[in-house]
Amino acid sequence: MTYKTGNLPKPFPRYGVSTTIFNNNGVINVFYHRTNVFAYDGSSHVTLNTGGYSSRTTKARINAAFIYAGLPGYHVFQRDYTWYLSCPNNHTTLWPYSIMKEIDIPQGVNYDL
């Protein structure tokens, strides 16, 4: 695990091999190998990117990034080779196999555990 620009408040949860985390003007970016798998603007928008790899490790990095960014109600999982995004309101969204997924985070929602 490598930290680049900026001081990040806490270590990345137990995942770290081939993972780079950096803060670019307030946007948290998590790279797994050369793919920016997670980008969060800190307030209302998340971009997920598999880079075309639907692996268990890619999902693990994305899920760890949700926790790291303070968004524990979000979780990516796979069932019967199909990816899904679970949201804090117990709503599950199909993530048809595509590389990128955009998420708008509702304002004023408390994501504390």
Image (cartoon, rainbow, N blue to C red):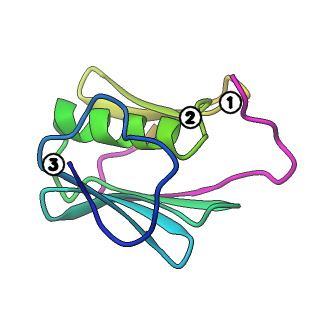
* Image vertical order of residue 41 relative to residue 10, above or below: below
Which element is circle 2 on? loop
Quadrant of res 100: bottom left
Q: Give how far apart the Cα atoms at labels 2 and 1 are.
A: 6 Å
Residue topped by disc 2: 74
* Image vertical order of residue 60 relative to residue 65, above or below: above
Most prominent secondary structure in the magenta stretch?
A: loop
Q: Amino acid at mark 2?
A: Tyr
At label 3, counting other C-alpha atoms closer than 10 Å, the crowd grade (few under 14, some 14-19, many 20 or more) is: some
Q: Amino acid at mark 3?
A: Tyr
- Number of the label disc, if any, that sits on residue 88: 1
Position of residue 17 measured from the top left corner of the image (x, y, whole percent):
13, 41
Horizontal side, residue 18 vs residue 37: left or right: left
Q: Is residue 99 magenta?
A: yes
Residue at image x 37%, y 40%? 12
Q: Amino acid at mark 1?
A: Pro
Q: Which residues are magenta?
A: 96-113
Which element is circle 1 on? loop
Position of residue 89 measured from the top left corner of the image (x, y, whole percent):
73, 28
Residue topped by disc 3: 53
Q: Earlier in the sequence, mark 2 or mark 3?
A: 3
Horizontal side, residue 25 vs residue 3: left or right: right
Position of residue 16 measured from the top left corner of the image (x, y, whole percent):
21, 40
Q: Nearer the viewer, residue 112 or 90?
A: 112
Which element is circle 3 on? loop
Residue at image x 68%, y 30%? 88
- Contact between marks 2 and 1 (CB within 8 A): the answer is yes
Q: Nearer the viewer, residue 48 or 108?
A: 108
Q: Give how far apart the Cα atoms at labels 2 and 3 are.
A: 20 Å
Instruction: Determine the residue located farthest toward the right in the rendered image.
Output: 108
- Contact between marks 3 and 1 (CB within 8 A): the answer is no
